[in-house]
Structure formats: C-alpha cells, structure tokens
Image: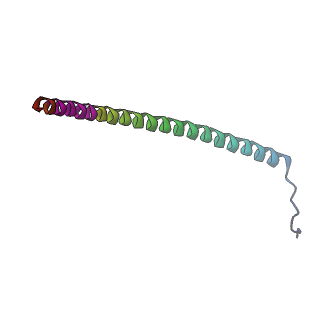
Amino acid sequence: MRERGETWAVDPEMREALDRLTADVRGEIHASSTSLHQQLSELIHEFESGIRRDFDAMAELLRGDIRALAESMVASLEQTDRRR
C-alpha cells in the first residue's frame, strides 16, 4: 500500500495523452472565453445603442414640450400686455 502523498509512476504514453488532452481542454476554454467576451461586447454595444436612441427620442419630445410651453408663455404675456 502507498503512503499518503506518494504518486504513481505514469507511463510515457499516458503522460503524452494527458498532456495532449490538457492542451486541447485549455484551447477549448480559451476559445469559449474569447467567444463569450465577443458576445458580451456585442450585447453591451446593442444595449448602449438602444439606450442612446431612447434618450434621444425622449430629449426630442422634451424639447417640443419646452418649446410649446415657451410659446404659450409668450402668447400669455402678449395678451397681458394688450390688456394694459
């Protein structure tokens, strides 16, 4: 029986197979990580674009409301001036 911490000898063919498997797994992890990063970047870009479009639309509506309010105030002031 082996004592704790002792390792078994690995035959060279098994070591080579394990090294190839390790390299393959690392390659797959790297490829998946790169792909995930790219997908996240695209999603963030789409989200930013959507937020910007929504903000621009809301800003335009607000400009219209402010313009209408200003015109209404000018008309009201003109009526007040005519009454004097």
Residue 26 drawn at (x, y percent): 70, 43
Whether residue 41 appears in magenta in the rendering, the answer is no
Tell me which residue sits at (34%, 34%) in the image.
59
Horizontal side of 11 relative to 70 (left or right) equals right
Whether residue 66 appears in magenta in the rendering, the answer is yes
Residue 45 drawn at (x, y percent): 48, 34
Segment colored magenta: 64-78
Nearest to the observer: residue 1 or residue 74: 74
Residue 14 drawn at (x, y percent): 80, 49
Q: Main secondary structure of the magenta part?
A: helix
Tell me which residue sits at (56%, 41%) in the image.
36
Quadrant for the C terminus in the image = top left
Residue sticking out furthest to the front: 84
Image quarter for residue 20? top right
Quadrant for the N terminus in the image = bottom right
Nearest to the observer: residue 68 or residue 74: 74
Horizontal side of 31 relative to 71 (left or right) equals right
Which scheme is used to colour this image of the protein?
A: rainbow
Tell me which residue sits at (60%, 41%) in the image.
32
Nearest to the observer: residue 29 or residue 64: 64
